[in-house]
Structures are given as structure tokens and as C-alpha cells.
Amino acid sequence: MPKRSTPFQVVVRLVRELYADTGATVTESKELYDRSAGVYREVDVVVEGKFDGEPICIGIEVSERTRPLNLPQVESLIQKHEDLPTDKLLIVSKAGFSAPALAKIAKHAPTVRALKPKTIEVDGKPVSTKFYVEAIGYDPTSCTALARRPDGTGICGEAEPHVPVFDKEGLDKGPMAFLALELLNHPDVVGHIQMTAHEHPDKEEVTSFTVGVPLAVLGYQLIDEALGERILLETLIIEGNLRIAQSEVPLVHAELDGKEYSAAEAPIGGRPAVWVGVTDPVEQTTKIKWQATDGKKPKPPVEPRPICFPEVSKLRFVEKMPMPQITVVSPDAS
């Protein structure tokens, strides 16, 4: 989360991002060099791009105060940008401006402009819409292997995480736990688990899942402890925990500087967040962006685990193989 950011500042930045021309960059809380003071100063939002082939830098200062910006506050911002490399200054105030402040800004037009968001209303009521966001998470807890001996006898048993899996030539590919994880990361499996969970009639009660993945085509093998030899792994059944969190996002339509947008503050995955959407009336499509506002820093990247079963990623369950059968289990299921 950028330093000193506020939810309204995030809204302003996301609106500019969604409307930005190709090649333009929008940065929140960017530091620009003050020529007279010889220091870097933070600007709430900076838009950089080209106009008629010439570079242009627009600085946006955002106020989320509950009272209109007054003359001294506006003067301070104008003076601040006199020695910054900004070609234009947009001062955005959620509560508007005092009359003297507007008069001061008018004297610096068109390089300085005052902007205030305006809620779009119909019959005196704000125009709003809402949608729901689902966060679906799952993790494996156990595996069951269905294998077949050379004589055609089928066997079934729990597969411990450390059990080695071999290829056709007898090469140890890696442990069963890694195979399960790589299967659960396959796009077809991910999509099918999520769709099945989404369409479950009692999704709020869902706590677990079961997925059976056919693997005979890969020729993976396990050691049959009774025979002391390798046998074909036909199917791996993975069970695990599944979590579904649903959040309502109530978007209110507004306009800022001639740009219509919808915005809301609604949590995602337990974190507070700001949502902004922009609709293209010609294409009849809406782009939505969100940003968490709890100030938590991203977790450091985890050292990537080596891929032990690259053949898994080449499988196409939808096109060439039966789609894995997935059962989403509710707590009261028998």
C-alpha cells in the first residue's frame, strides 16, 4: 500500500488507470524532485504520458477531508508544484472548495484545476449497482491411489505424502505430495473445482472436496509392497478442505472530470478494499479494479518448488480425457 494513501486517493488513481491512454503510466504516492529545495516530494497521484508526441506529467493532489479545501490549503499545493516537474496540477477534493480557493485556482487556469466528484442521481436517488465476489480456497489433506497390477488386479489404498512416484522407465519423479499439488494447480482441475463449488446449492456450508484424476495415460507407477514391484497408477483421488467466502460490492455511480465510474469500499478475502469500475458503452463491457487498503505489505516471494511432474501440465482433461469427477461435500452429507 503506497504511503499516506487513503481510500479516496485509491479511487482517483484507479479511475485514472482505467481511463489512461495506451502508454501512459499512473503512479500513486510518487516522489518528484523539487528543484528549489533539492529534495523529493510526494505527490498523491502522477500521470505520465505523451500529448502530440511530447512528454507530459500531470500531478494530482487528493483531499478526503470532510470540509472544503480553503484558500491557504490550495495556495500551499500550488506553491508546492511550482518547483516540481508537473505540467498540470489537478486538485481533487471530496468535499469541494471554498469560494476564495476556487478564485485562486481560476487565476492559475488552465495549468491548475479544481475537481470534485459528483454522485450520479436519478429522481434524486444515487444510481448504484452491486455484484458479488467469491474467494475460493482449497488445500489437500489426503490421497487415495487406484493402481493396477500386471495381472489386471486392481488395488486401492491410501497414499502417504512421501511415497515415491516413478515413470515408465523406473525413474523416481518425486513424492506423492508433489504430484497431488501439481494436479491441483492444473488449470482444468482448478476451473472445475471452482465452478462446481460456485454452483453448489449449499455453498455456504461447503467445507471439503474430493477429486479423482485419471493418470493411466502418463504411465506413472508405484511400488506394490506385497509384490515388491512397480504397478501402474491409474487414478489419484485427492481430498481436502475447501473454503468459500462471498462479499457484496455495492457500487455507487459517480463522475469526476467528465469521467464516469462506479466505486465502493468492500472487503475481499477478509481485507478491506476499494473497488472501481468503468463501463465502455460501445463495447458494453465493464472493467473493474480493486486494491486492498489495510496497508499490509506483500509477502516476500516464496522460493519456487521445482516441477517434478511436467507431463501433468500437458494433459487436457476437457479435450482428450474425462473431466475429473469432483464432489463438494457439505458437513451434513452422509
Image (tube, helix red, strand yellow):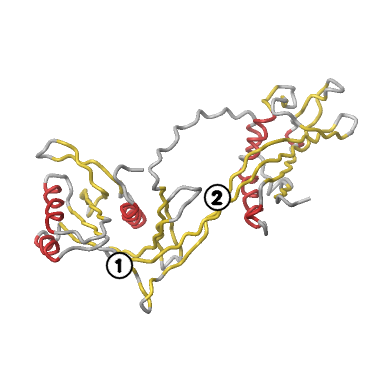
Q: CA distance from mark 2 to mark 1?
A: 32 Å
Q: Which residue is mark 2?
A: 135
State the residue in front, 270 or 14. 270
In this rendering, would 125 be left or right of 141? left
Which quadrant of the figure contains the N terminus? top left
Residue drawn where x is 14% and y is 64% of the image:
102
Tag 2: amino acid:
Ala
Q: Are marks 2 and 1 in contact (CB under 8 Å)?
A: no
User: Could you tell me which residue is drawn at 59 percent across and 50 percent down?
Assistant: 244
For residue 59, side relative to residue 242 (left or right) = left
Residue at the far top in the pictured view: 228
Q: Quadrant of residue 120?
A: bottom left
**What element does badge 2 sit on?**
strand
Amino acid bearing label 1: Lys
Crowd rating for badge 1 (residues with CA inside 10 Å; few <14, some 14–19, many 20+): some
* Residue 244 visible somewhere in the drawing: yes
**Residue 20 visible in the shown view:** no
Q: Position of residue 156 (x, y in %)?
A: 83, 35
Residue 240, how many percent across, how many down? 68, 41
